[in-house]
Amino acid sequence: QVQLVESGGGLVQAGGSLRLSCAASGLPFRETNMGWFRQTPGKEREFVAAIAWYGTTIYYADSVKGRFTISRDNAKNTVYLQMNGLRPEDTGAYYCAGRGSGTVRSILDGIIDYWGEGTQVTVSS
């Protein structure tokens, strides 16, 4: 059974930082492209960042470029999202996503094989 378990969310003031983690099990993590999405009430889930299984191909949404960093540790079956310079508009539920086949680019198109249950990030102004 595939499980993606997010952690690290919380309440932070604008300008602050958080690091989200996503621990994966039940899948060949070393061969799985991973990503992060976020969603606020009333809006569609939106792409945030993606990283290829080999780690060197990375994509970011324009809204987070220069502030967020995605990384992975294949030895720990974990993907991270370091979020710096947080803004109130970054508030939302953050979801870990896995794409086991195809390219990492397909994550940007919302083609996802596995989803986590999400962790809440709230940025106060």
Image (cartoon, rainbow, N blue to C red):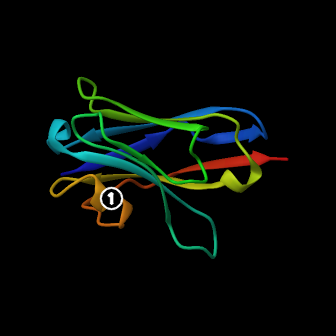
Q: How many marks?
A: 1
Q: Look at the picture and state if 30 lies above or below 91.
A: above
Q: Secondary structure at mark 1?
A: helix
- Residue drawn 50% across the image and 67% down it: 45
Q: Look at the picture and state if 106 lies above or below 57.
A: below
- Residue drawn 60% across the image and 73% down it: 43
View extreme (top): residue: 75
- Residue drawn 15% across the image and 56% down it: 101
Q: Judge the density around disc 1: few (<14), some (14-19), many (≥20) Cα neighbours within 10 Å.
A: many
View extreme (right): residue: 125
The percent coordinates of residue 102 (x first, y second) are 17, 58
Question: Which quadrant holds residue 54?
Answer: top left
The foreground one among 68 and 65 is: 65
The percent coordinates of residue 57 (x first, y second) are 31, 40
Q: Amino acid at mark 1?
A: Ile
- Residue 122 shown left or right of residue 70 in the figure: right
The percent coordinates of residue 63 (x first, y second) are 61, 53
Q: On the image, numbered disc 1 is attached to which residue?
A: 107
View extreme (bottom): residue: 42
- Residue 14 shown left or right of residue 4 in the figure: right
- Residue drawn 70% across the image and 49% down it: 122
Q: Look at the picture and state if 51 lies above or below 102.
A: above
The percent coordinates of residue 29 (x first, y second) are 20, 39
